[in-house]
Amino acid sequence: MFQHLLLPLVILAISPIPGAFEDSVLSPAQEELEDLDCGHPEPSDRIVGGSDARPRSWPWQVSLHHGGGHICGGSLIAPSWVLSAAHCFVNNRTLEPAAEWSVLLGVHSQDGTLDGVQVRAVAAILVPDNYSSAELGADLALLRLASPASLGPAVRPVCLPRASHRFAYGTACWATGWGDVQEKDPLPLPWVLQEVELRLLGEAACQCLYSRPGPFNLTFQLLPGMLCAGYPEGRRDTCQGDSGGPLVCEEGGRWFQAGITSFGFGCGRRNRPGVFTAVAPYEAWIREQVMGSESEPVFPSQSPELQSGPWELKDENCTITLPECGKAPQPGAWPWEAQVMVPGSKPCHGALVSESWVLVPASCFLDPRSTDRPPRDLDNWRVLLPSRPRPEQVARLVPHKNASWDDTSDLVLLQLRAPVNLSLGPRPVCLPHPEHYFLPGSRCRLARWGSGGPASGPTALLEAELLSGWWCHCLYGRQGALVPPPGHPPHKLCPAYREEEEENESSWSLLCQEEGTWFLAGIRDFSSGCLRPRAFHPLQTHGPWIGHVTQGAYLEDQLAWDWGSEGEETETQICPPRTEHGACGLRPEPAPMGLLWPWMAEVHVAGDRVCTGILVAPGWVLAATHCVLRPGSTTVPYIEVYLGRAGASPLPQGQQVSRLVISIRLPRHLGLRPPLALLELSSQIEPSPSALSICLHPGGIPLGASCWVLGWKDPQDRVPVAAAVSILTSRLCHCLYQGILTPGTLCVLYAEGQEDRCEVASAPLLLCQTEGGSWVFVGIAVQGSRELFATTGPEEAWLSHTVGEAHFLPPSGSPYWLPEGSNLCPLDMAGASGSSSAVLFLLLLTPLIQG
Ligand code: ARG
């Protein structure tokens, strides 16, 4: 497979192969050898999309065994010589010992006694010096048998083309082998040799298909000495295990080997025909290797009338084929929507995945408490499909093997009694391959899935946008967990949508669109509690199972790869620390619909002023006391809190949340007006990308954090601005503000030019991002100041007691406000308080906590 191109290409340095030239004896004239017959199967009469071959129809096909099993194919080209692919024998840049291999000739089925099969040891394996990896060409090998094969009706050599031989573009040729019948789907017992008809593709046509980026922008350069065969629409191909086997074309009653199965991108995929090593260009190399041995291959000359082409149509237009699945006339009018009617139960919604198969949740039919036995009375089951006059009958039910205990595998496939005509009305939905990467920001929809409510209404149109994998994974995942990078199946998919419209009790599938084509991306995960965004189980891990059962479902490659700033998405990401109450302080990447500061709240006080606030738990917002309570007033004002508004692009109104404040709590301090106030919300706010609690840190600033003051440039417009700051050491702060500091206050120094980014009336927030990536709330500006911040430090006990679910991270670093000797202040400092030049001067003397 081509899959390993995802890894950096390693150039294999092939050491000179022992034995390569040991038979260098002059060869007899080639023409004499033509009396050794080649390319004639005894007249008597899969691979992907192929079928069982008849015995003896491909008598040159051999099976190469290593470690007791079939590894690769090969072709007999002379009684003592087998042609195969180099990559079958070169592992980690070294050629595997010939003695470990055996060649089986005359095999039809690999199961059972292998009656009449000849087994030969391998005396030598010869690989071109310039071979390094299949994708870089020269992927061929010659195997010299320890003793010659005895030729007969089941064992005969194929003809080899001369270097001048031309195989016309469009010729129907045949590939054979015991390889996988689909990606990761081995040939089933009794392992009968498969054959498939493949068309030779012109070089330009093949290069055109491979120049179109696939997943991960992968393209591939076809090199001289390679040839392609297959179909732009895929579905018929060679696959793993077929390598080394022949691609043969018939000419004038003889079969010539045009190619050696080498590699591909997946198997049978659209626009990804199989790539073969072209045999003709290696005539000289082959002759050189076999020269002088007791038997040599035959290179019959091509009859002149066959040399007329067509070869390459230079101006051949570059036609990419588009999927035949996933086309909907308009969102919501899903032509794959299937309703399964079972007497005595609610209709169950699923999706048509091929002309004969419907995918539905297993929970519609399987009782999890009963034994795993699937229902058998399928006679009365009916499937309703769009624009079909009559319901379909059901022939078979195939549950996923984990369906009854693992809700990520809550799937069954139903086979229809008769295939439906896909050109009229119903159409299948496209399914993703395991490495599909639905880009953050993808436009998706929710579609009915399982036994939900009534089948009508606008809910079929629920619009959704996919959130970044990092966000989804870390909201639900473990601390320190590795976020699956693009190309690895995600654990969950998180679409953001307006849940107000969601019907109770209904389950949903997630359809995501790429280039106008809809993929079934996921099914709703009900185990995720009340966290938002709701999580979906990705369907992509089930692609191979669905492909295996249906033998024809539309697994399609990703159609969109444009993920903006290059490379960013491929960095390894790790989930930041979380607390016992779940994730906190996650800040989404700036995405189209992303909110930059999901914990920043707008606190509207009595309709006359707006303060910043910060969500510290689903039901609590922290704000500056001076901002929410006017001096002298004794009554609690009418306060409203808004979340989901502070961002590069504020969320649409429906995704903003607001709550009334039902009480204001102040820590009990005798004689002092405490700087921080907790606002209790009328009801909890479910964690979501637009409203997520901030982390708190016991003892102040986490070690190695970088800090920002976050506020508004202007209390009217409320566009959030962040200013980078350094935090002064507590000694420096104390000395600068001698006498006026209350415990737990800290000082910041703004990075140059950042001083007056935020106005102070709304009491900006001080936040730091830890090395682990979580954002931590540190303090709120004290009244009228830009530099002084009242921290949560002294109020930790009060905070965790009042809030209950405050997200205190485990302690790290040293507490900021531990009392330090005040007698250490330089003499002239008291008067310099607040003067930034004095601060700068002092900076030179005193190390800072890094900002
Ligand atoms: N490299 C594979 C093997 O070792 C053959 C893959 C052929 N793939 C294809 N899509 N044509 O068996």
Image (tube, rainbow, N blue to C red):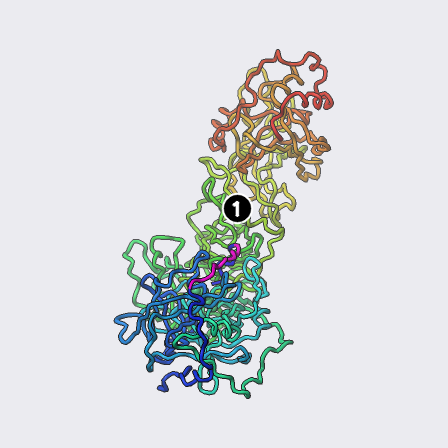
Residue 230 visible? The answer is no
Q: Position of residue 641 (x, y in %)?
A: 59, 36
Q: Residue at x 51, y 79 (%)?
A: 162
User: Which sits in the foreground, 234 or 626?
Assistant: 234
Label 1: element kind: loop
In the figure, 581 relative to 200: above or below? Answer: above
User: Does mark 1 have its CB less than 8 Å from ligand 1?
Assistant: no
**Relative image position of residue 638 (x, y in whole percent):** 60, 32
**Taking the image as four quarters, which one is ligand 1 found in?**
bottom left
Find disc 1 in the rendering and name its residue. Answer: 572
Does 11 appear in magenta?
A: yes
Give the vertical position of 93 relative to 61 (above or below). Answer: above
Is 533 rendered above or below residue 35? Answer: above
Position above or below: 731 against 439: above
Which residue occupies the foreground of this view, 487 or 532? 487
Quadrant in which the C terminus is drawn: top right
- The prevailing secondary structure element of the residues shown in magenta is loop
The structure residue drawn at horizontal position 58% and vertical position 25%, both measured from the top left corner, is: 791
Instruction: Specify few, some or many for label 1: CA neighbours under 10 Å numbering under 14, 14-19, or 20 or more.
Output: few
Q: Residue at x 62, y 25 (%)?
A: 848
| Residue 291 visible, this orientation | yes
Give percent across and percent down for residue 828: 71, 13
Foreground of the two, 374 or 151: 151
The boundaries of the magenta stretch are: 8-18
Q: Farthest residue toward the front?
A: 25
